[in-house]
Image (cartoon, rainbow, N blue to C red):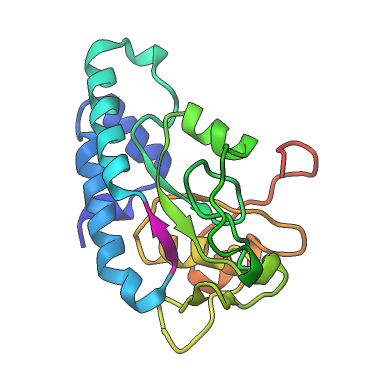
């Protein structure tokens, strides 16, 4: 496995700002990993790989032209987004069959903040129907499988996030949690998940 797949988003941001690795290389390595694992685990339900590569090239240009102290904290670092968040141009069904085909027309505040911080979303990830269950399955995208054992579940509702991060396809991602929806998938997929205190971050 490429060692870049084992590094945190914070570490990758540091390396990119220092010019030790390009954002384009980091993004392309994670795209290749998603292409390798996603047919097995079905975690990323819609990708934006071409756009991500172009955004990575722009991030690399910014590293060359701007003082490091002025660069956004996560400049050039790839990530993934839970499908229930509105992300302009991407599906926004929340796994509900009657919402299939709906495309978000604007970014949710949390998505906008990640982009403003310089992160580069690679795609959106699977959830249970309306984010209501602790197994990640719905009639729009099907089931997400555990990267350690595809016969087992990934938890929910941020199950696609837990699975793709656990499989090395994304260094970090955006989830949501009321009753365990970040914490359970993190546990099930062997990664760290953080639920912020209530009212600090818009949901």
Tell me the residue at 53%/50% (across/down).
103
Q: Is residue 39 above or below residue 15?
A: below
Seen from the viewer's position, the closer of residues 24 and 98 is 98
Q: Is residue 75 above or below residue 187?
A: above
Left/right of residue 88 with respect to residue 78 in the rendered view = right
Tell me the residue at 31%/41% (across/down).
51
Q: Quadrant of the N terminus?
A: bottom left
Left/right of residue 94 with respect to residue 74 in the rendered view = right
Q: Position of residue 134 (x, y in %)?
A: 67, 75
Image: magenta residue range? 43-47
Q: Is residue 114 above or below residue 66?
A: below
Left/right of residue 141 with respect to residue 134 in the rendered view = left
Q: Is residue 9 magenta?
A: no
Seen from the viewer's position, the closer of residues 100 and 83 is 100
Q: Is residue 48 above or below residue 130?
A: above
Left/right of residue 120 with respect to residue 56 in the rendered view = right
Q: Position of residue 158 (x, y in %)?
A: 59, 62
Q: Quadrant of the C terminus?
A: top right
Seen from the viewer's position, the closer of residues 67 and 86 is 86
Q: Position of residue 79 (x, y in %)?
A: 42, 47
Tell me the residue at 68%/65% (across/down).
131
Tell me the residue at 28%/31% (across/down).
16
Q: Classify residue 128 by image quadrant.
A: bottom right
């Amino acid at each position: 496995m490429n060692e870049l797949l084992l590094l945190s988003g914070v570490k990758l941001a540091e390396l990119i700002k220092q010019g030790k690795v390009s954002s384009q290389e980091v993004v392309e390595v994670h795209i290749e990993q998603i292409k390798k694992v996603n047919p097995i685990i079905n975690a990323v339900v819609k990708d934006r790989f071409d756009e991500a590569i172009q955004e990575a090239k722009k991030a690399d240009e910014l590293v060359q032209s701007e003082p490091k102290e002025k660069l956004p904290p996560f400049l050039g670092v790839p990530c993934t987004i839970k499908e229930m968040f509105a992300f302009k141009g991407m599906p926004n069904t929340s796994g509900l069959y009657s919402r299939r085909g709906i495309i978000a027309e604007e970014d949710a505040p949390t998505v906008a903040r990640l982009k403003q911080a310089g992160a580069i979303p690679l795609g959106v990830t699977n959830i249970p129907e309306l984010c209501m269950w602790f197994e990640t399955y719905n009639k729009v995208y099907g089931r997400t499988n555990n990267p350690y054992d595809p016969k087992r579940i990934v938890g929910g509702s941020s199950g696609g996030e837990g699975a793709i991060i656990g499989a090395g396809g994304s260094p970090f991602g955006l989830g949501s949690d009321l009753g365990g929806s970040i914490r359970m998938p993190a546990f099930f997929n062997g990664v760290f998940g953080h639920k912020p205190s209530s009212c600090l971050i818009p949901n």
